[in-house]
Amino acid sequence: MNSVTSDALSALGSPDNPLRVAIVGSGPSGFYAAEALLKSGLTVQVDMIERLPVPFGLVRFGVAPDHPKLKQCTAIFDQVAQSSHFRFIGNVTVGRDISVEQLQHTQHAVLFACGAEVDRRLGLVNEYLPGSHTATEFVGWYNGHPDYRERQFDLSGETAVIIGHGNVAIDVARILCKPVDELRSTDISAHALEVLATSRVREVHLIGRRGPAQASFTAKELRELGDLNGCEVQVSATDLQLGPVCLEELKVNNNFNAAKNVETFLGWSTRAVKPAAKRICFHFFQSPIDMIGKNHVHSIRLERNTLTGLPFVQSPRGTGITSELECNLVFRSIGYRGVPIPGVPFDTDRGIFPNTAGRIGTSPGLYAAGWIKRGPSGIIGTNRADAVATVQSLLADLMQLQALPRSGADTLSDFLAHHQPVVSYADWQRIDAEERIRGAAAGKPREKITRVSDMLDLVERSRHSMKPINTAQSLGSSS
Ligand code: NAP
């Protein structure tokens, strides 16, 4: 395998000398980056590497099962994957099965779109008491993520506390409070449905360290909580008496989401409280300072905060006034962090790959898009513009990328020769078809296969029994 310098060949991005880009991660930002590259007008070969045998990352494993519209973007991703210049390389972990250095050896650019996989920590001594879970675990569990499939959640107690005032906290609250029969026709995983059907949780407390004007819920998602069948929402009117800085924030034109949220809270605070099977209670200006319990969490200690600082940068400051809230379960939902990959610079404070307009470090060739680029913010659509911006940076670097020494042929297959099995997009389509068949039998859009071993068994069996769907997609074939 000889290394050749691309400038000895035709211009990079021409049919004779395709721009080879590896995208690490197959969630929305990865697919939007692939789409932008394939529509760039250049000849590009995209190799998308995914550690699981199934694609779509956050769309498959993060979006709540009762929000199917948010998953419609997979139709676009499917179209992207049909390109003969696109290969899905599933069941391969970058940094373990193939190194970043090996990728750089063969690709002109490596674009990381690997998201933010782990939760931020509260930093409390008793944060990990049994009964205290991360939102990631719970969301991954009900969405059938293989990493969280075996987690146990004891829903036999009546009171759950969720820390954090973001959309993930709302998802967790809604899944806990929605009548389970309304979840049966979604793609929620069967193991989660079974446990939720026996849940005795009837009170969910959502704890925010700042006020109603600073909550990061999107207005639509917040309002939805008020419309849940058999569930009442409770907010203290005292918490809604806003100080002058908060009022100033709400007056700013582009802060309409916060203004709508406050309006929603005000509406709820004046609504007559009706008896209901379940209740969601919002708490503001409260920081958790301890979790209490010997072998299991039985309460959480909170400290009342006041806000200090200028509009939009107000931070919570403890007042010393504390209270205790009894509970059987805690979910910590305070945002996510990326995880480092050997060979890529990592910002440990922010949990991202440090970058400038998507360029990681100073030498060209490494790029980032999505949550690993900017942190866990925005909705799924936000990742489209973000990925396009990174691809623009990459394409602007074409001259420098052309000058990099890269192996002439696609040698990814050589590097992965001993790694079995590598899962192609055609393999995923067979998993997809099987999930849909299983789902139809249960009146659901799909019944997800939730163990990697079961996915790989299916791939293996179907490879022996079926004709390949698209042979151009298999690893090692030319584009
Ligand atoms: P998020 O929106 O950033 O919310 C995190 C929450 O945790 C904030 O209320 C934050 O308060 C709080 N927090 C952070 N550190 C804390 C600490 N040490 N102690 C107490 N509270 C703390 O994060 P997320 O809910 O994980 O959502 C991630 C992204 O996914 C967001 O952009 C969200 O909109 C998106 N998402 C969208 C949907 C949807 O569109 N349906 C669904 C799920 C997720 P401060 O504001 O004070 O920092």
Image (spheres, rainbow, N blue to C red):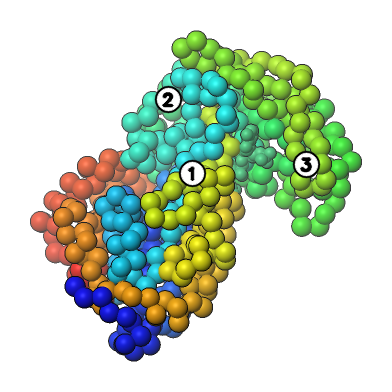
Q: Residue furthest top?
A: 294
Quarter of the figure that contains the C terminus: bottom left
Camera-near label (1 vs 2) is 2
Q: Residue 438 bears which disc, if any?
A: none
- In depth, the one of 63 and 368 nearer the eye is 368
The answer to whether any part of residue 388 appears in the image is no
The residue labelled by disc 3 is 314
Label 1 vs 2, first from the N-terminus: 1
The residue labelled by disc 1 is 64
Quarter of the figure that contains the N terminus: bottom left
Residue in the image at 53% along x and 20% along y: 126
Query: What amino acid type should be assigned to the residue bearing mark 3?
Result: Gln
Q: Residue 153 bears which disc, if any?
A: 2
Q: Is residue 382 above or below residue 363?
A: above
Dot 1 beta carbon under 8 Å from ligand 1: yes
Q: Secondary structure at mark 2?
A: loop
Where is residue 223 shown, x and y percent of the image?
Answer: 66, 42
Marks 3 and 2 in Cβ contact (< 8 Å) = no
For the residues marked 1 and 2, what is the alpha-carbon distance in whole angstroms?
17 Å
Query: What amino acid type should be assigned to the residue bearing mark 1?
Result: Ala
Residue in the image at 53% along x and 50% along y: 347
On the image, which quarter does residue 105 sit in?
A: bottom left
On the image, which quarter does residue 357 sit in?
A: bottom right
Where is residue 78 shown, x and y percent of the image?
Answer: 37, 64
- In depth, the one of 149 and 196 nearer the eye is 149
Q: Residue furthest right?
A: 244
Residue in the image at 54% along x and 38% along y: 120
Camera-near label (1 vs 3) is 3
Going by the image, does 159 lie left or right of 248?
A: left
Label 1 vs 3, first from the N-terminus: 1
Where is residue 197 shown, x and y percent of the image?
Answer: 42, 26
Q: Secondary structure at mark 1?
A: loop
